[in-house]
């Protein structure tokens, strides 16, 4: 999967973390195989995570075997995938957990087999390290944009998503901002729009059918935001705007064209994956990071600054 050669750019990361590979010596364990399980390979964000991880792994060992699979937010499916990685004797698992707590037995089982487990994008109980966006901050800045644009008054919706830690944290950050504005009425905050374009479209159709006046929607990721925009256009609802989280290529396009999407808090899945592999390789060889929870900061991409936005590092 994803066998194309990818040029590697040196990337300076937040929190002073360097992507410089640990110095190799004769005693280092070789990186022969990595297993990656993510929420959905139908989402370009997770595809970029896989590509970034593969590029870094091949920098360590050009002959490394990288296997990437889609859990589709199904815990039973993800347990089976981890069992398969254990049977294949991978050296490292990059885990985007379908459930941050329930996944722990699978994590422990992999570790008992001598496999390093690094959680990526969302937390996973028991993982050796976690690399993710500061999702609370991402939710805060995306919803602060809404609050300011509405001058603290109006009807807003939090379009929720799969109950993984990244989504929970984004919603937490958003709610903390909205709570400071008593005249912002949250019409809905608990509907799971599945993290997908189709899910966002379906959820938005429901909102706009139920609520005659909606001023703004915070979608927990860009695919949901794009789907929500399509639904609003179909129902000819123009007097509202949408913000989200990801800073994905699709949203760059949306911010430059005639859509209701006004802002997206950025992530960098490429750098996230590269960092995770670097940290995992260090852990394989007894080098523990100073902090096992590595949070990458988010910045807000808007119509005003999108032309200067550098996008995901894989660009």
Image (cartoon, rainbow, N blue to C red):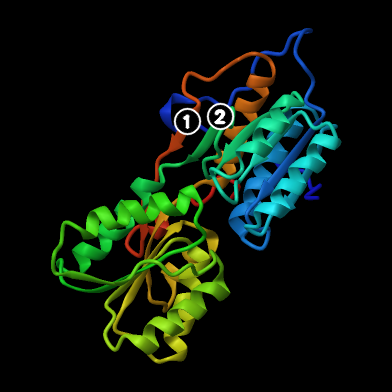
Considering every residue shown, the one lying at the far top of the view is 26
Q: Left or right of 187: which side holds 169?
A: right
Q: Specify whether residue 8 is in view.
A: no
Q: Viewer-proximal residue, 2 or 235?
A: 235
Figure check: 311 above or below 195: above
Q: Residues within 10 Å of mark 2 (few under 14, many from 20)?
A: many
SS of the residue under disc 2: strand
Which quadrant holds residue 220? bottom left
Q: Secondary structure at mark 1?
A: strand
The percent position of residue 4, horizontal first and vertical second, equals 79, 48
Instruction: Decide: few, some or many residues near mark 1? Use Cα within 10 Å; few <14, some 14-19, many ≥20.
Output: some
- According to the image, label 2 marks what residue? 129
Picture residue at 39% right of the left edge, 81% below the top: 207
Question: What residue sits 44% from the left and 25% below the top?
Answer: 16
Q: Which residue is mark 1?
A: 293
Please provide percent x and percent y for residue 78: 70, 49
Earlier in the chain: of badge 1 and badge 2, it is: 2
Whether residue 289 is visible to the viewer of this picture, yes or no, is yes
Q: 255 or 150: which is nearer to us?
A: 150
Looking at the image, residue 157 sits to the left or right of residue 53; the answer is left
Q: Is residue 205 left or right of residue 105?
A: left
């Amino acid at each position: 999967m994803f066998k194309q050669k990818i040029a590697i750019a040196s990337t300076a990361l937040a929190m002073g973390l360097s992507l410089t590979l640990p110095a190799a010596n004769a005693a280092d364990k070789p990186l022969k195989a990595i297993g990656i399980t993510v929420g959905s390979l139908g989402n370009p964000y997770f595809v970029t995570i896989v590509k970034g991880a593969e590029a870094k792994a091949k920098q360590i060992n050009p002959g490394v075997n990288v296997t990437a699979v889609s859990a589709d937010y199904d815990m039973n499916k993800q347990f089976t995938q981890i069992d398969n990685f254990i049977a294949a004797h991978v050296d490292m698992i990059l885990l985007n957990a379908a459930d941050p707590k329930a996944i722990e037995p699978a994590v422990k089982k992999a570790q008992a087999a001598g496999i390093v487990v690094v959680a990526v994008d969302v937390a996973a109980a028991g993982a050796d390290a976690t690399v993710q966006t500061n999702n609370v901050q991402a939710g805060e800045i995306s919803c602060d944009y809404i609050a300011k644009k509405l001058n603290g008054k109006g009807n807003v919706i939090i379009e929720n998503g799969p109950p993984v830690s990244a989504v929970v944290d984004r919603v937490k950050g958003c709610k903390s901002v909205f709570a400071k504005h008593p005249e912002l009425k949250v019409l809905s905050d608990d509907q799971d729009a599945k993290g997908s374009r189709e899910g966002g479209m379906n959820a938005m159709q429901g909102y706009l059918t139920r609520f005659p006046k909606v001023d703004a929607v915070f979608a927990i990721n860009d695919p949901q935001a794009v789907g929500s925009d399509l639904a609003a256009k179909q129902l000819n609802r123009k007097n509202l705007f949408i913000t989200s989280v990801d800073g994905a290529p699709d949203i760059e396009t949306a911010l430059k064209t005639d859509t209701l999407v006004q802002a997206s808090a950025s992530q960098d899945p490429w750098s996230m994956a590269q960092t995770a592999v670097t940290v995992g390789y260090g852990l394989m060889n007894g080098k523990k990071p100073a902090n096992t929870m590595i949070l990458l900061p988010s910045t807000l991409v808007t119509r005003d600054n999108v032309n200067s936005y550098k996008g995901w590092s894989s660009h």
